[in-house]
Amino acid sequence: MEKKQIRKYVLEKRREITDEECEAKSRVICEKIMEMEAFQRASCIYVYMDFNHEVSTKMLIEEAWRTGKRVAAPKVFGEHMRYFYIHSYEDVSAGYFGVPEPVCTDEEAACEDALLIVPGVGFDAERHRCGYGKGFYDKYLSVHTEHPTIAVAFEFQVVDDVSADVYDILPQVLVTEERVIG
């Protein structure tokens, strides 16, 4: 499938999933990540703020805060994104296309080896990623190369093939509610 077709297919499937299914599958995915050495050893995590039936990152965020890890979330500036530390959910509000973003930009995150949780619309079994089409994560990761990366997706987001682009940066690991690829 072309990336445009993948986006249409996955967004339709996300509309069909109930809040309860989204929460239950997200919990399984987050539990898998929290058991990983990369999460346990991280002193800081960079994590997207989920939106519109994406895999919920709330459990990861709360566990990071509970265990004393710093948490940073992305904020879009034009064609790029930067990460800022958040200390509570009050530190975020609707931003770019309604996606929650940090409201305070005084504390830019500077942890170059932070565990980075990567969202995506679709993936294949080789971890090729189809995002929303703006390339924010690929641009960020092309400059910030030391981050260990874990992508998250529901199993229905894993398709047969995602056409790779020369600019695409593969996450090191992909976690769904059914498997860990990587």
Image: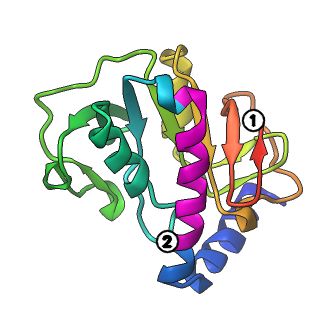
Instruction: Report, in whole angstroms, how far the alpha carbon at label 1 lies from the one at label 2.
Output: 32 Å
Q: Earlier in the sequence, mark 1 or mark 2?
A: 2
| Residue on which disc 2 sits | 23
10 Å crowding of disc 2: few (<14), some (14-19), many (20+): some
Kindly indicate the quadrant of the structure image that contains residue 111.
top left
Q: Is residue 81 left or right of residue 120?
A: left
Quadrant position of residue 47: top left
Tell me the mark number nearer the camera, choosing from 1 and 2. 2
Residue 170 on the magenta span: no
* Residue drawn at (61%, 48%) of the image: 32
Indicate the amino acid at tag 1.
Asp
The structure residue drawn at horizontal position 15% and vertical position 27%, both measured from the top left corner, is: 107
* Region of the chain picked out in magenta, as a range: 23-38
Residue at disc 2, secondary structure: helix
What residue does disc 1 label? 165
User: Where the C terminus falls, by quadrant?
Assistant: top right
Along the viewing direction, whichever of 159 and 136 lies nearer the viewer = 159
Q: Nearer the viewer, residue 169 or 38?
A: 38
Mark 2 belongs to which amino acid? Answer: Glu
**Figure check: 9 above or below 98:** below
Q: Main secondary structure of the magenta part?
A: helix
